[in-house]
Image (cartoon, rainbow, N blue to C red):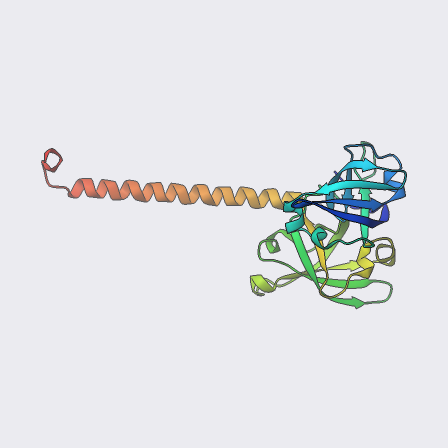
């Protein structure tokens, strides 16, 4: 588990293809200072497992599924990434509960600089749109943020968007300060929202199955009532 409070800006030093996965090596002296084989580190929002480490770098494997659904498939040597070690018991939860299991990506639509802050709008897929609510928590490239605005319900599902407001500290200490229109970012929605959606889908599926069973039973009963006497014997 993570908190979404970035500890360090790391630098990708190598991306080595291993079949349909990659071995990602990242320089991050702070997060690797006490890292051991098997430890979890959030790399721009994706929970990865340390398989090798040196005094300043660590290597982790990124599986095909993760490459397909995240922005990690486009990482190259020299790219900056947000790094956070897994939370420890007793740590302050400065952000929110972040699992490192992203839901997909979002694309930056626009940025607008205000007096000491920046508004950033992201496009949302129809699948993720119901999971993002105004004033709710969201992790963008591993950064814990509060949603400042969402598109009206009248907007078509394929045109949905949400906004966050970034303070100077976030702009300077994370990769979000360098993001502009067209850039893709990793998105992890609130875990509670995901559980609620799952329960609603299961309830809807159960209701549909019950309705179908009732309709089938009614049709069978109607057929039995309308059948000629003695028809069963023929």
- Quadrant of the rendered image containing residue 100: top right
For the image, the number of numbered tags is 0
Residue 83, horizontal then vertical, whole percent:
81, 46
Residue 168, horizontal then vertical, whole percent:
87, 59
- Quadrant of the rendered image containing residue 40: top right
Residue at point 84%, 35% (across, down): 35
In depth, the one of 63 and 109 nearer the eye is 63
In depth, the one of 196 and 123 nearer the eye is 123
The reply to whether residue 97 is visible in this rendering is: no
Is 155 on the left-hand or right-hand side of 138?
Answer: left
In depth, the one of 56 and 97 nearer the eye is 56
Above or below residue 33? Residue 161 is: below
Quadrant where the image shows the C terminus: top left
Residue at point 89%, 37% (across, down): 33
Residue at point 80%, 36% (across, down): 52
Residue 41, horizontal then vertical, whole percent:
78, 40
The reply to whether residue 21 is visible in this rendering is: yes
Is 61 on the left-hand or right-hand side of 68?
Answer: right
Residue 226, horizontal then vertical, whole percent:
16, 43
In depth, the one of 13 and 144 nearer the eye is 13
Quadrant where the image shows the N terminus: top right
């Amino acid at each position: 588990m993570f908190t979404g409070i970035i500890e360090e800006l790391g630098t990708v030093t190598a991306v080595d293809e291993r079949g349909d996965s990659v071995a990602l090596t990242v320089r991050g002296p702070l997060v690797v200072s006490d890292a051991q084989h098997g430890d979890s580190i959030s790399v721009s929002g994706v929970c990865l497992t340390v398989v090798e480490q040196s005094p300043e770098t660590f290597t982790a494997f990124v599986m095909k599924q993760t490459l397909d659904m995240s922005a990690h498939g486009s990482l190259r040597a020299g790219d900056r990434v947000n790094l956070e070690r897994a939370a420890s018991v007793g740590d302050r939860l400065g952000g929110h509960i972040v699992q490192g299991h992203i839901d997909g990506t979002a694309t930056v639509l626009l940025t607008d600089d205000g007096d000491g802050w920046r508004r950033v709008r992201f496009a949302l897929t129809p699948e993720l749109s119901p999971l993002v609510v105004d004033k709710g928590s969201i992790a963008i490239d591993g950064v814990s943020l509060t949603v400042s605005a969402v598109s009206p319900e009248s907007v078509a599902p394929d045109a949905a968007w949400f906004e966050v407001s970034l303070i100077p500290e976030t702009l300077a200490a994370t990769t979000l300060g360098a993001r502009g229109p067209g850039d893709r970012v990793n998105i992890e929605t609130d875990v509670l929202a995901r559980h609620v959606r799952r329960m609603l889908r299961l309830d809807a599926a159960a209701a549909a199955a019950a309705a179908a069973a009732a309709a089938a039973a009614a049709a069978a009963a109607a057929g039995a009532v309308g059948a000629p006497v003695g028809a069963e014997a023929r």
